[in-house]
């Protein structure tokens, strides 16, 4: 009995027992911290992917590829499409039901390590983001990498002025002396001017504000897909002359596509274009006092020696569609077509829509009273006369040149 009592009263080894118990608890906390750290890292990765995917989806709102755009972007960040839910409009939050917004939800099961000891082999990690589009602050892009991208000259009737008071000019030319060249008494005025290379000016005119030089070249801000057509099935060239005004046969379905082997309008009559996309597989010319009219129209010039020349003094009233694949696009010259586009604006001329000719020159001649609610994405720009340009975005609500931005 004394021996048993002695053993029961023996306190040796208690520290070891307490140490083992404390160490078990401590290791549990360490394991918990490690797994939580891994889960938080995964949360950050998924949030980054959700933000990027929402921006990519919002950029596709005008083109109808919202889900594909968001999921493809998420895949580039390592998130499979099966884990990505895209909603346009959002199904939750303050922007629920608004088709101008894109909601992206990402949910994946993240394996745990030490938590397996507590029968927690994985935990769901999720992220959510919402994006929309806001008007771009830039409305003139000249994408030529060399030479003079912007040439402002005088015309015989007086000074050549380019005024873009509410948006900015970006010039990709790296020419060290004359990426932008101003001559004579004309002036260039914009919200801001950025040039990859440098600029020159002669004469009594001015450039305001002073351009920022040495910027990084911008990418083409538009990604357009050419309309589908069969060249051999195009209608014969349409010609109108004399004083007759006519309505050209338009697409078989409203807003559809029709192809012509050229359009020519001379004399004093007006050609009216029903809404739709017109593939001009040839030259498109308007001269004299002839006029053009059309609402919801896009004119596409395919690759080849196809030129656009809208000159003379006739009344012009053309506006781009505000929905669909070519929302906001008035003139679309294929990147493989490098023929110069020539446009004359007068007091009776209104152009509402974007001029897109990324590898061609646009010669723009204006006079007081011409209305240009337009953005320009061209290879180079030659200005003569007085041209006042207003950004297309306020007119359309959302321009294809809008920037995507996060809101949630």
Image (cartoon, rainbow, N blue to C red):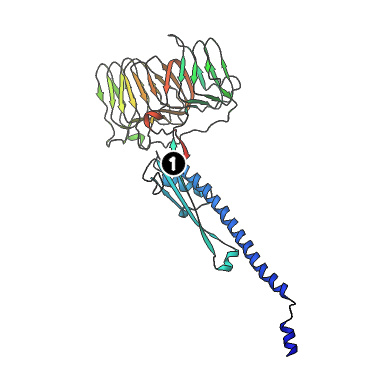
From the viewer's perspective, is 83 left or right of 347? right
From the top left corner, tell me how far across and down residue 406 is, in percent.
48, 41
Q: Is residue 15 above or below residue 141?
A: below
From the top left corner, tell me how far across and down residue 360 is, in percent.
47, 26
From the top left corner, tell me how far across and down residue 222 is, in percent.
46, 34
Comparing 169 with 24, the one in front is: 24
Q: Residues within 10 Å of mark 1 (few under 14, many from 20)?
A: many
Mark 1, residue position:
58
From the viewer's perspective, is 49 left or right of 90? right
From the viewer's perspective, is 62 left or right of 72? left
Comparing 397 with 64, the one in front is: 397
Q: Quadrant of the N terminus?
A: bottom right
Q: Residue at x 39, y 14 (%)?
A: 368
Q: What secondary structure is marked by label 1?
A: helix
Q: Residue at x 35, y 21 (%)?
A: 350
From the top left corner, tell me how far across and down residue 225 is, in percent.
42, 37
Q: Is residue 21 above or below residue 45?
A: below
Q: Is residue 280 above or below residue 95?
A: above
């Amino acid at each position: 009995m004394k021996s048993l009592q002695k053993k029961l009263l023996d306190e040796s080894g208690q520290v070891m027992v307490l140490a083992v118990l404390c160490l078990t608890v401590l290791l549990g906390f360490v394991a918990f911290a490690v797994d939580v750290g891994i889960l938080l890292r995964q949360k950050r990765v998924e949030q980054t992917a959700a933000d990027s995917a929402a921006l990519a989806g919002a950029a596709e709102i005008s083109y109808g590829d919202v889900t594909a755009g968001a999921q493809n972007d998420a895949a580039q960040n390592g998130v499979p499409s099966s884990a990505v839910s895209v909603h346009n409009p959002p199904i939750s939050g303050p922007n629920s039901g608004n088709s101008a917004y894109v909601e992206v939800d990402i949910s994946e099961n993240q394996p745990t390590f030490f938590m397996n000891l507590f029968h927690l082999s994985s935990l769901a990690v999720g992220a959510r983001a919402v994006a929309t589009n806001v008007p771009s602050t830039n409305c003139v892009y000249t994408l030529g990498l060399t030479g003079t991208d912007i040439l402002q000259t005088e015309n015989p009737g007086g000074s050549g002025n380019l005024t873009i008071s509410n948006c900015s000019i970006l010039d990709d030319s790296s020419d060290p002396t004359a990426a932008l060249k101003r001559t004579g008494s004309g002036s260039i005025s914009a919200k801001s001017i950025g040039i990859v290379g440098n600029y020159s000016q002669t004469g009594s005119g001015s450039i305001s504000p002073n351009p920022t030089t040495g910027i990084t070249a911008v990418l083409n801000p538009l990604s357009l897909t050419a309309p589908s057509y069969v060249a051999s099935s195009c209608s014969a060239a349409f010609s109108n002359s004399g004083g007759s005004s006519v309505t050209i046969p338009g697409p078989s379905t409203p807003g559809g596509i029709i192809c012509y082997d050229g359009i020519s309008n001379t004399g004093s009559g007006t050609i009216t274009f029903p809404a739709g996309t017109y593939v001009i597989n040839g030259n498109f010319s308007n001269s004299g006092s002839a006029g053009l009219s059309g609402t919801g129209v896009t004119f596409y010039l395919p690759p080849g020696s196809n030129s656009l020349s809208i000159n003379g003094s006739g009344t012009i009233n053309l506006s781009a569609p505000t929905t669909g694949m070519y929302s906001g696009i008035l003139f679309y010259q294929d990147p493989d077509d490098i023929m110069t586009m020539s446009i004359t604006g007068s007091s009776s001329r209104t152009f509402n829509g974007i001029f897109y000719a990324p590898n061609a020159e646009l010669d723009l001649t204006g006079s007081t009273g011409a209305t240009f609610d337009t953005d320009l994405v061209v290879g180079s720009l030659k200005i003569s006369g007085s041209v006042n340009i207003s950004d297309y975005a306020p007119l359309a609500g959302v321009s294809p040149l809008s920037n995507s931005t996060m809101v949630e």
